Image (cartoon, rainbow, N blue to C red):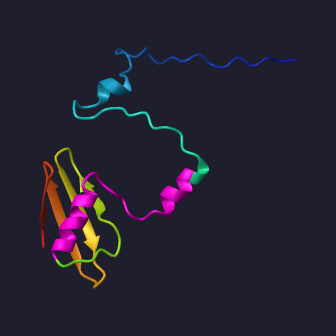
Amino acid sequence: MRSYTPPRSTAPAPAEAPVSLSESLSPSEQIVDMPQQTQQTQQTQQTSTSKRGELSDVVERMARRNSCTPAAGAKLIAKTSAVETYQISCEDGQQQLYKCELRQCRLMN
């Protein structure tokens, strides 16, 4: 009976130690541990088409003051550290965009 011995690697050892994930991130990035989701929670999130943001309620109130009856909630469409952009669909078919910079929101169109 023969035995198999795998060939030894002739590749040189790496000159540098591997870099950890946290070391490879820029200062503005961070690792966030996400809790495990149940199947029901995942299905609920997949069927929800509206992504709410921190200032969704404020934007919805502003839309009402600008002659828009929201057909759905304010949808967060873009977010950076200081700016959030929202879209609102009105019942009459018009669309409104709002930009919130440092918690100060204004109508874009």
Image-based side of 27 in relation to 2, left or right: left
Q: Find residue 62 and report its horizontal and vertical position in percent.
A: 18, 67
* Residue 23: x %, y % from top left: 31, 24
Q: Quadrant of the N terminus?
A: top right
Q: Nearer the viewer, residue 69 or 28?
A: 69
Name the magenta segment's main secondary structure. Answer: helix
Q: Is residue 9 above or below residue 107?
A: above
Q: Position of residue 99 (x, y in %)?
A: 16, 60
Taking 83 as reference, is 49 above or below it? below
Is 42 part of what is drawn in magenta?
yes
Residue 9 pos. (x, y %): 54, 18
Region of the chain picked out in magenta, as a range:
41-66
Q: Is residue 48 magenta?
A: yes
Q: Is residue 97 rendered to the left or right of residue 3?
A: left
Q: Which residue does the image show at 24% across and 32% down from the upper left?
A: 26
Left or right for 98, reference 18: left
Determine the image quadrant of residue 55: bottom left
Q: Please state, as top left, top right, bottom left or bottom right, where the C terminus lies in the image.
A: bottom left
Which residue is the extreme one toward the bottom?
92
